Structures are given as C-alpha cells and as structure tokens.
Image: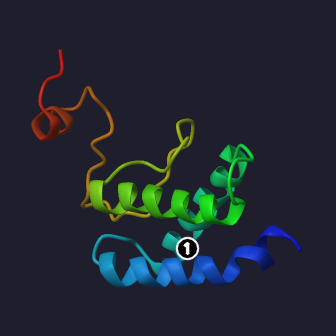
Amino acid sequence: MDIYDTYKDEVKNITGRYFKMYKNKVYSYEDLEQTVWYILLVGIEKFDGRGVKKDFILFFIKYKLISILKYNRKPPYCTDNPFTPLATDFISIDDKNTSCFRKVHGEYE
C-alpha cells in the first residue's frame, strides 16, 4: 500500500474536524488538507522506528496542527519557503525579532 491509500481516511477526518473548529482562521478546506498531508510526510520522515508508526504519525499531525492553528505557528521544518493555511489576518509569532513575539512571550534575555 502506498502512503495515500494508508492515510487518506485519517487525513480527511482530521482535516474535517479541525476545519470545523478553526474555519474562521484558515483560507480553505483544501489548504488545511494540504497542510495535513505535508505534516504527515514530515512525520513519516521523523519516525525513528520506536513504537507503532501510524500512532506516531497521527499524534505528530495532531500536535503540529494545533501548534499551527491555535498558536499561529509555521508548519514544521518549513524554513526556506514557508507556507501557512492561516488567513492573512493572523500573524505568525515564531520570529523572536518581531514585536508581536516579545509582546506575547516576553523578553527572554
């Protein structure tokens, strides 16, 4: 079985669940689904062989997606060409040099 056939039902369920909760923050259902597929592929690459692969992938997707949608973070390991499913009204506060990051997280120096 290939990756698409193995995970397509889980991806549809996860995308639908989080789209219902955060539909006011994302551009579209399709963008969110594409982000879930991206996170899934990153999770497959990060899996180190310990435990059950499918369980690891689903937990990885859940926590990374919450980080993106709830805390306005960038997708994992997406540094060269960053993308986000979030609407432009929501600012990513990942960058330590921005005033938004300092306002939310405070100064750490």
Image position of 42 with respect to 101: above or below: below
At x 46% / y 55%, what residue is drawn? 64
At x 62% / y 65%, what residue is drawn? 55
Q: In the rendering, at what x and y percent does residue 56 appear?
A: 61, 58
Q: Is residue 56 left or right of residue 83?
A: right
Q: Nearer the viewer, residue 63 or 23?
A: 63
Q: Is residue 108 left or right of residue 22?
A: left
Local crowd size for mark 1, using a 10 Å CA cut-off: few (<14), some (14–19), many (≥20): many
Q: In the rendering, at what x and y percent does residue 5 appear?
A: 79, 79
Q: Is residue 7 left or right of residue 99?
A: right
Q: In the rendering, at what x and y percent does residue 31 appear?
A: 51, 70
Image position of 92 with respect to 103: above or below: below
Q: Nearer the viewer, residue 86 or 69?
A: 69
* Rendered image coloring scheme: rainbow
Going by the picture, which residue comes out furthest to the front?
51
Please tell me whether mark 1 sits on a helix, a strand or a loop.
helix
Q: Quadrant of residue 94?
A: top left
Q: In the rendering, at what x and y percent does residue 109 appear?
A: 17, 14
Q: Give the number of callouts.
A: 1
Report the amino acid beneath label 1: Glu
At x 43% / y 82%, what residue is drawn? 17
The residue where tag 1 is placed is 33
Q: Nearer the viewer, residue 65 or 63?
A: 63
Q: What quarter of the picture does the N terminus occupy?
A: bottom right
Image position of 47 with respect to 37: above or below: above
